[in-house]
Amino acid sequence: MSLKKRQLSTLKEKILSEKERILNAFDEAGEERFHLSTEDRLDEVDQATSEYERSQMLRFRNRDLFYVKKLNKALEKIASEEYGVCEDCDSTIKFERLMARPTAELCISCKDEAEREEQANFVTRQSKSMGKKIDLVGAR
């Protein structure tokens, strides 16, 4: 059973709203938050603190940019009528799951299975949500 038009409309609004919220936060933050003034460099401790804060802001910004890409992918899937279909088993992802995580690409059953496989394989893990391989050999 596929998603109803009303459900798709609700999810699309949620995705657009979330994307707008993130992009507005970027606009409000502005680039000045990523540049240090000479006052911030009074001593080594202040400089180290500023560099740490800048690093954290950049990390959060990159995470948000990655999320915006996932939101855009979800919008593309809505446009091509592929949204809400599990990439592993082709079943419909439940509306409640998509409301909680609009970028979900796997149904709960497949996500649970993927997480079990990730935990079971200690040498190489591939995160379904991040799409990256994680090499744990020699990671001690």
Image: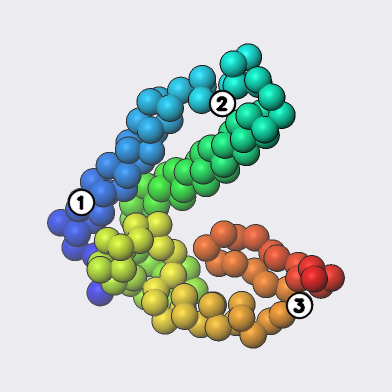
User: Which element carries disc 1, helix, strand or loop?
Assistant: helix
Nearer to us in this view, 38 or 91: 38
Of callouts 3 and 1, the N-terminal one: 1
How many angstroms separate mark 3 from mark 1 (CA)? 42 Å
The amino acid type, in three-letter code, at marker 3 is Val
Q: Residue at x 35, y 30 (%)?
A: 24
Badge 1 density bin: few <14, some 14–19, many ≥20, Cα 10 Å = few
Of callouts 2 and 3, the N-terminal one: 2
Nearer to us in this view, 71 or 50: 50
The quarter of the image holding the N terminus is bottom left
Q: Which mark is residue 34?
A: 2
Quadrant of the image occupied by residue 72: top left
The amino acid type, in three-letter code, at marker 1 is Ser
Q: Describe residue 5's horizontal placement relative to residue 26 as left or right.
A: left
Q: Describe residue 107's horizontal placement relative to residue 100 as left or right.
A: right
Picture coordinates of residue 130, whole percent (x, y): 57, 59
The amino acid type, in three-letter code, at marker 2 is Phe
- Please give the residue where the numbered disc 1 appears in the rendered image: 9
Picture coordinates of residue 20, whole percent (x, y): 32, 36
